[in-house]
Amino acid sequence: MDENKVIADMALFEQFIKNEDPFGTVDYKRGGDEYKEVYKKMKKIQKWWNNYENRLKDIDNARELWYDSCKSEKGDAKSLRKLTSIERKMVNMEVKLAKEEQEMLHMLIDIRNFLWT
């Protein structure tokens, strides 16, 4: 997923939360099942988004560790296993974040009609 696209879409959500104060304006808990589900999704997106920058930093740190290890390793079997382990962790983090981005953007699409009070 293009990181800039995620940031732009989530910035709209963040703007909605700040400007519209949906949790203080709309009583989602009394609005029926659909509103309760929208409330849960908004909270989930908000929590995920508030941690997004940290996740990107974690991936960058893993990438730097992998790069530094590449420069310093000797190329023997033990060193290659260590590099492979670091690389696997980094790739897993990237794949997990990409899946989460996709999920959150879909969730945002699902609730878009509720975003302006």
Image (cartoon, rainbow, N blue to C red):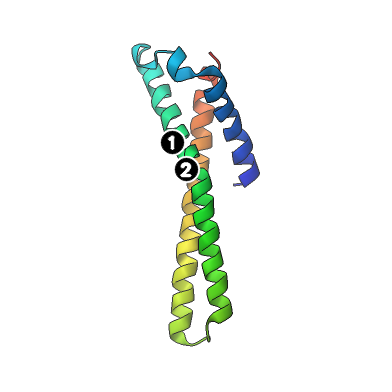
- Secondary element type, mark 1: helix
Picture residue at 56% right of the left edge, 16% below the top: 116
Mark number, residue 62: none
The residue nearer to you, when weighing 33 against 18, is 18
Asked whether residue 94 appears in the rendered view, the answer is no
Q: How many numbered badges does the structure rendering display?
A: 2
Amino acid type at image mark 1:
Lys
In this rendering, is residue 73 above or below 60? below
Task: Give the x, y percent position of residue 81.
Answer: 44, 78
Left or right, residue 68 beside residue 37 = right
> Are the residues at dot 1 and dot 2 in contact (C-beta closer than 8 Å)?
yes
Secondary structure category for the residue under label 2: loop
- The kind of residue tagged 2 is Asn
Other-residue count near label 2 (Cα within 10 Å), few / some / many at <14 / 14–19 / ≥20: few
Q: Residue at x 49, y 62 (%)?
A: 90
**x%, y% of residue 53?**
53, 46
Q: Is residue 3 left or right of residue 75?
A: right
Q: Which residue bears the numbered disc 1?
A: 47
Which numbered marker is on residue 51? 2
Task: Name which residue lies at 49% across and 50% down.
Answer: 55
The residue lying toward the viewer, choosing from 61 and 75, is: 61
**x and y percent of residue 60 in the render?**
55, 58
Between the C-alphas of marks 1 and 2, the distance is 7 Å
